[in-house]
Image: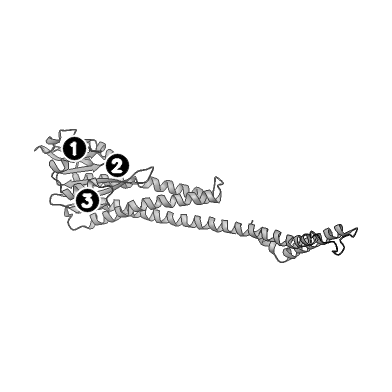
Amino acid sequence: MIRTCVVTKDFNVIYDVPLQSVKSPDVSWYWVDFHEPTDEEVKLLADFFHFHPLAIEDCLEYVQRPKLDFYDRYLFVVLHAIEQKTLEAEEVDLFVGQNFIVSFHKQTIRGINQVWTRLKTEEDFKIGPLHIMYHILDKLVDDYFPPIYHIEDVLNELEENTKNETIQEIIEKVFDIRGDLSKLRRTIVPMRDLLYRIIYSERLQRMRERQLYFHDIYDHLLKLVEMIEANREITSDIRDSYLSLNSNRMNTIMMTLTVITTIFMPLTFIVGIYGMNFDYMPELHWKYGYFAVLGVMAFIATAMYFWFKRNGWFRFHKGND
């Protein structure tokens, strides 16, 4: 689908004009948005707008890294939006000239729709194509914040373990969050580098007067990168803490089993000897032999228990329970 919008020389905004009319003399500048375009509509990038074949190829190959290319009469900018549920990158391509901006995207992009709607009602949006590019960038970057805020809330819940989840469940969630943070990082860091290039490029002299606006977006991206790194450190701390706790519990369990096994070893030894089928074993036919063996076994078990307790084995177990 292609939608059009023109701003006349007296700053009137007109939507859905025929594509051939966007270049009429009374139009100050225009915006053409390619939204989920068909193959026939894609051909207009070359046939009607005469964009460079390499730029058109970048539009069709999904997903390009965010970048800025300079052509004779326009800028070609590749941006990334974020799909809020999957956190996957969605490509947005912009052709920005002196009196036009052409946007190209294969998915519905909320930020572009917001700017498209507000263009008619807000005077600030009517300044020109470069300002529209700024507002699109600003909206895309604003949409990066909600997923990170959500991750921070989840991490706070995991730290406090308000739901009394098991260690295995917590560790699985931590690894899922680290995967989400990696997705966000792969999107946001290249966007930060792109904004740095836009701000400090010598070829964008006309952008100097709007440099503060782009600096504001760049500051937001710096903050986002810091939040991602901070959250990655928190996930590492949570993971290490729970792995350490799990290891400690396993050591405690193993020690408990070792104590029990050690106590039963001599008892098993005695039972094993008297379980042998020999006729001439000492005291085999003694009237009180059975009770005597039980007494010896009880004495050995009790003596070993107090010996382990005296050496601090049970105090160690209690301290790590």
Q: Residue furthest bottom?
A: 311
Q: Is residue 185 left or right of residue 266?
A: left
Q: Nearer the viewer, residue 138 or 12?
A: 138
Query: Residue 309, relative to residue 141: is it above or below?
Result: below
Mark-to-mark CA distance, 2 and 1: 25 Å
Mark-to-mark CA distance, 3 and 1: 36 Å
Q: Is residue 96 visible?
A: yes
Q: Callout 2 environment at 10 Å: few (<14), some (14 to 19), or many (20+)?
A: some
Mark-to-mark CA distance, 2 and 3: 20 Å
Query: Residue 260, relative to residue 18: is it above or below?
Result: below
The x and y percentages for residue 58 are 22, 49
The x and y percentages for residue 227 are 39, 53
Q: Which residue is mark 1?
A: 40
Q: Earlier in the sequence, mark 3 or mark 1?
A: 1
Q: Residue furthest right?
A: 287
Q: Earlier in the sequence, mark 2 or mark 3?
A: 2
| Label at residue 210 | 3
Q: Earlier in the sequence, mark 2 or mark 1?
A: 1
Q: Which residue is mark 2?
A: 111
The x and y percentages for residue 272 are 76, 60
Query: Residue 11, relative to residue 218: is it above or below?
Result: above
Q: Amino acid at mark 2?
A: Gly
Q: Secondary structure at mark 2?
A: helix
Q: Secondary structure at mark 3?
A: helix
Q: Nearer the viewer, mark 3 or mark 1?
A: 1
Q: Secondary structure at mark 1?
A: helix
